[in-house]
Image (cartoon, rainbow, N blue to C red):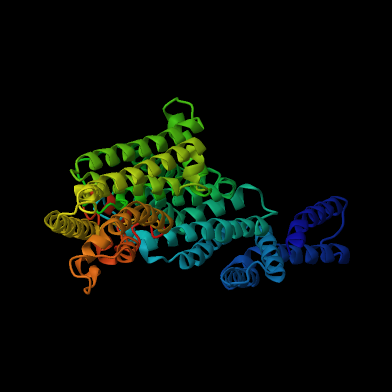
């Protein structure tokens, strides 16, 4: 139709000029040739008016183009829009519409339909949630995990597919059209809401678990960084890029604010001495596990990148020693806390077990990220301190009791022929055994609530007590058992004994057992610990951050 209508102008001009020429040459008006020319001119003029009428409402072209736009919209709403048949049909429709200058009508339709499709896929309830400084990160942990998943799906699946569709459909109508279409679709279909929710996460209560979640969020953004930068280009995506920069800035600042304050937060707990039961305070086990998480293969590269960005903004250069040095400062504050808590306790034996347990805890960091960072010499030093405090405990706890077994009756009774002296010696031995048993019971009762959490260490310290106490006690009995038997040869000499050597050994080997009720009472004293864990008490005081 367009070819014929455009050719009509040339034909009309040619025929009109021909008739004018023939008339000038004397051809009569009723000449058959002239009449045929005039008929042809009328037909051509009528044909020339066909195209404008076809575009009018109700016209042939109007109806045909309308049907094409309807089909165009229908295909765009299909789930399998990227199938070969659908793409081929969309491209053919665009070519026809573009040929009839209808592109300006189909582009808005395309944007509207595809925007609604994506909006439906990104209908997420939590995006409207308000987050304030009063909100704990654990309260929105599920939303954060969902956000991370949705960000990856949005960029790597939804918008990447949408960008490809734009460029495939409009590949023959100019590069600016697909870029402009995708930009408008992206800006109005939900990506901005996702990004703004990510920024709101950084506003929740500032505590150590929040740092780990912010690292996860940054990791998600880092994983999609290349695809994100490739997709959201051009002027239409400028707001998306601005909100993304704001999100990254909030994540970096949120991580650094918490990380740099960690040593100070540990130091602030120094006046809050925990209830000492000789076990490892929850603060110590939690913070060491927390540091292990920060140094893990997932978190350390992200934390290093964030610190590098933060220092770069401050015109400073990042080095890995900055990270490891800061972790060392955290451990130093823990050590100072332990020294302060141990010194505040007047019971030397309890302090010894307390320090032994904590040094054993640090020895247990061998083959962990934290242990590898601190090095072999640091771990060996803690092993030496552990053994030192174990030996000191045995001396401080049992030394005075064993001194009772040096009773002077040894030089008085057996060689004397005097019955009176022998009787006095027997009474002295009885009193010594009574005092020993009483002293042993007092120590056992007092220390029955103390714990040694490492089973191997508990066995080792119990064996050390057995080797120290039982042989001395057994030797004392062997020295005076015959003298005790002289009182009444027919009676059982063991009636004066509260404990046999075997009984002592059995009681000593049951000391320092972990007790659940004591574990539940331990260390409910620190705001910092509550912030770090925010978990229910577990049976094992070596709590970890797995639930954070």
Q: Residue at x 49, y 57 (%)?
A: 151
Residue 425 figure quarter: bottom left
Q: Position of residue 241 (x, y in %)?
A: 48, 44
Quarter of the image with the C terminus in it: bottom left
Q: Is residue 299 left or right of residue 395?
A: right
Q: Is residue 242 left or right of residue 413?
A: right
Q: Nearer the viewer, residue 161 or 295?
A: 295
Examine the rendering and report whether any part of residue 206 can be seen: no
Looking at the image, is 185 positioned above or below residue 327? below
Examine the rendering and report whether any part of residue 227 can be seen: yes
Q: Nearer the viewer, residue 283 or 411?
A: 411
Looking at the image, is 341 positioned above or below residue 322? below
Q: Is residue 318 left or right of residue 101?
A: left
Q: Position of residue 406 (x, y in %)?
A: 24, 47
Q: Nearer the viewer, residue 274 or 10?
A: 274
Residue 60 figure quarter: bottom right
Q: Residue at x 34, y 60 (%)?
A: 140
């Amino acid at each position: 139709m367009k070819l014929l209508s455009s050719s009509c102008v040339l034909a009309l001009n040619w025929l009109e000029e021909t008739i004018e020429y023939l008339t000038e040459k004397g051809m009569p008006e009723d000449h058959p040739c002239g009449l045929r020319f005039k008929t042809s001119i009328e037909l051509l003029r009528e044909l020339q008016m066909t195209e404008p009428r076809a575009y009018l409402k109700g016209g042939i072209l109007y109806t045909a183009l309308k049907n094409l736009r309807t089909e165009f919209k229908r295909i765009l709403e299909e789930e399998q829009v990227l199938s070969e048949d659908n793409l081929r049909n969309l491209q053919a429709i665009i070519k026809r519409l573009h040929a009839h200058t209808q592109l300006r009508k189909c582009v808005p339709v395309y944007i509207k339909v595809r925007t609604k499709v994506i909006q439906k896929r990104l209908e997420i309830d939590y995006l409207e949630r308000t987050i304030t400084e009063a909100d704990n990160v654990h309260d929105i942990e599920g939303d954060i995990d969902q956000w991370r998943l949705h960000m990856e799906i949005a960029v790597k699946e939804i918008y990447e597919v949408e960008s490809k569709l734009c460029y495939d459909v409009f590949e023959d109508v100019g590069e600016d059209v697909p870029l402009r279409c995708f930009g408008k679709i992206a800006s109005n279909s939900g990506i901005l809401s996702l990004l703004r929710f990510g920024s709101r996460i950084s506003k929740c209560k500032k505590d150590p678990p929040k740092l780990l979640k912010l690292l996860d969020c940054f990791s998600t953004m880092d994983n999609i960084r290349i695809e994100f930068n490739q997709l959201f280009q051009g002027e239409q995506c400028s707001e998306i890029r601005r909100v993304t920069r704001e999100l990254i800035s909030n994540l970096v600042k949120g991580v650094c604010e918490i990380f740099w304050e960690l040593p100070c937060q540990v130091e602030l707990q120094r006046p809050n001495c925990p209830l000492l039961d000789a076990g490892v305070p929850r603060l110590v086990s939690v913070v060491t596990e927390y540091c292990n998480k920060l140094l893990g293969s997932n978190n350390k590269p992200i934390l290093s990148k964030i610190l590098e960005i933060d220092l770069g903004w401050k015109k400073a250069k990042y080095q890995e020693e900055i990270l490891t040095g800061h972790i060392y400062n955290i451990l130093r504050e823990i050590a100072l806390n332990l020294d302060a808590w141990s010194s505040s306790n007047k019971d030397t034996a309890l302090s010894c077990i307390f320090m032994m347990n904590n040094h054993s805890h640090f020895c247990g960091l061998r083959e962990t990220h934290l242990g590898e960072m601190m090095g072999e010499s640091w771990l060996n030093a803690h092993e030496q301190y552990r053994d030192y405090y174990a030996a000191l405990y045995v001396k401080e706890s049992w030394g005075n009791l064993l001194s009772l077994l040096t009773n002077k009756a040894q030089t008085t009774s057996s060689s004397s022929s005097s019955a009176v002296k022998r009787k006095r010696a027997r009474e002295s031995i009885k009193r010594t055994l009574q005092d020993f048993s009483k002293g042993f019971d007092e120590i056992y009762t007092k220390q029955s609530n103390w714990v040694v959490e490492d089973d191997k260490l508990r066995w080792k310290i119990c064996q050390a007590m057995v080797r120290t106490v039982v042989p001395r006690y057994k030797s004392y009995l062997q020295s005076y058992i015959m003298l005790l038997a002289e009182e009444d040869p027919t009676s059982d000499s063991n009636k004066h004994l509260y404990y046999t050597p075997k009984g002592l050994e059995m009681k000593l080997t049951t000391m320092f057992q972990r007790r659940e009720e004591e574990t539940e009472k331990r260390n409910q004293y620190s705001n910092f610990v509550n912030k770090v864990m925010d978990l229910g008490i577990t049976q094992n005081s070596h709590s970890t951050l797995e639930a954070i």
